[in-house]
Amino acid sequence: MKIGRLFDYIQRYFSTAVILSVLVFLTVCCVNEQQIETADPAPEQPKVATFYVATTGDDGEPGTKGKPRIIATTDGEIDDRCSMVRFLLYTNEWDIEGIVISSSEFHWKGHDWAGVKWIDEDIDLHAKSYENLKKHDPDFPSPEELKKLIYVGNIDNVGEMKKDTPGSDRIVEVLLDDKPGPVYLQAWGGTNTIARALWKIQHEHPEQMKKVSEKAIIYIILDQDKTFREYIQPNWPDIQVLGSFRQFETVAYGWDEIIPDKEHKFYDSKWIKENILEEHGPLCASYEAHDDGRFRSEGDTPAFWHQIDVGLRSMEHPGYGGWGGRFVKEKKAKNVWRGAKDDGSYSKPLWRWSKAFQNDWAARADWCVKDYEQANHPPVVKLAHGPDLKAKPGQTVKLSVKGKDPDGDKLSYKWWQYREPGSYKGQVNIQAAKKPQASFELPEDAKPGQTVHIICEVTDDGDPPLTRYARVIVEFE
């Protein structure tokens, strides 16, 4: 949005302290964009393998599924607290290794500080719905288990990384263990606690740096202190970093100036009140929407949307795109990826999924208070063939997906070309795009090695309607 319009918006809703913080935020965004602006090429392979275990094998049948291992770090800003309400309703989706209280350039101990007890308080509210949530998925960790995962990190000042803390030591412990799979380090605030952990490994376990560089994946919201650019990037160039330096704004404080009007119904006061705030248990009732019930801000939520496996394969490659956004490699960086554009827009890689992720959240809120038979659950989607295909120009590619709904709901299908992640930028014409079996002919002008990404959206007719996906990547021979 234009800065003048944003400032008018801020004056209506925020204090002077917050206005100053947002001005700093705008300065940082401008600096980041000046440093990293470049054209969006087709995705290239990451320098470091992500270790993500696919949910389907080569034959389209389920493979060995491992939950993503995550550590969330947060500075406790009001939008972090909003994100935490949603986060707690998805704890069954991950192997959570830590929830770390950290600082940022906006919040640190003694400065606009929420304290270190607010997550415990949220979990106490969450506990009142826990037994009901288990009816929908027994994998929800208990409130007692979640509380054991809370650690205090480096909070004394903005960017402080000079001392070990329980939070930084927990990150060290997890990064040095021998469990398989990547560890996603989410920076909802600053990266200083993560930086301290990496500094300790560098100086006390230098022989482990290669292992850790291949294991850690850092997802940064905004970049809220100097420790990433000044310490992590130059000392750990091989770590994969997903920088939502600008794209996160889509669901932050100025969302109503960024998200298209047609999507506003999923964020307005009527929707938030009906689906979250009212009659959905004490945790949802605590959600800090605007006074009139409108969505306020969840600028940090993309950091964990990225690790919710909905079938879009976004954890396989930063450029594929999914609920947590889409990324392109920074110019001159080895493994740092920033928000990419869809249709020329930095925000579309997030808002294009608005209906799906908001309805999914509404269903989770229902799980807090409804029995299994009364609530909706997402369909299960499997390809009837491998997720990666090869074909020659002029050849017809046949696509097939199997959908099953746990509630017996009717399913609808929609195949479409996600053009930006593919290296072939032309349009393909998908036949029978609203049926489980579809096809398209590879264009004659395609070159060997180019790719086309095809998405199948499978949506049930439950209340609210829920969507899962399959992605097929076709490479030209």
Image: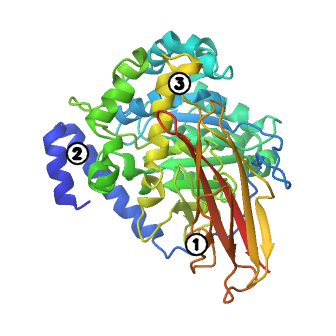
Judge from the rendering whether residue 150 lies leftward or rightward of residue 26; answer left or right.
Answer: right
> Vertical placement of 131 versus 444: above or below?
above
CA separation in Å, label 1 and label 3: 49 Å
Image quarter where the C terminus lies is bottom right
CA separation in Å, label 1 and label 2: 32 Å
Q: Which mark is residue 20?
A: 2
Q: Three-letter amino acid code at disc 2?
A: Leu
Judge from the rendering whether residue 197 lies leftward or rightward of residue 117; answer left or right.
Answer: right
Rendered image quadrant of residue 133: top right
- Residue 41 image position (x, y, % from top left): 57, 75
The local crowd at label 3, few if under 14, some if 14 to 19, many if 20 or more residues have their Cα within 10 Å, is some
CA separation in Å, label 2 and label 3: 44 Å
Disc 3: which residue: 375
Of residues 56 and 328, the one drawn nearer to the viewer in this rendering:
56
Q: Earlier in the sequence, mark 1 or mark 2?
A: 2
Judge from the rendering whether residue 17 lies leftward or rightward of residue 359; answer left or right.
Answer: left
The local secondary structure at tag 1 comes to loop
Disc 1: which residue: 332
Rendered image quadrant of residue 43: bottom right
Query: Can residue 157 be seen at all in this image of the molecule?
Result: yes
- Residue 403 image position (x, y, % from top left): 69, 45
Residue drawn 44% across and 15% down? 121
Of residues 413 and 108, the one drawn nearer to the viewer in this rendering:
413
- Residue 222 image position (x, y, % from top left): 43, 51
Q: Three-letter amino acid code at disc 1?
A: Lys
Residue drawn 65% across and 59% down? 237
> Vertical placement of 302 versus 275: above or below?
below
Query: Can residue 164 be seen at all in this image of the molecule?
Result: no
Q: How many marks?
A: 3
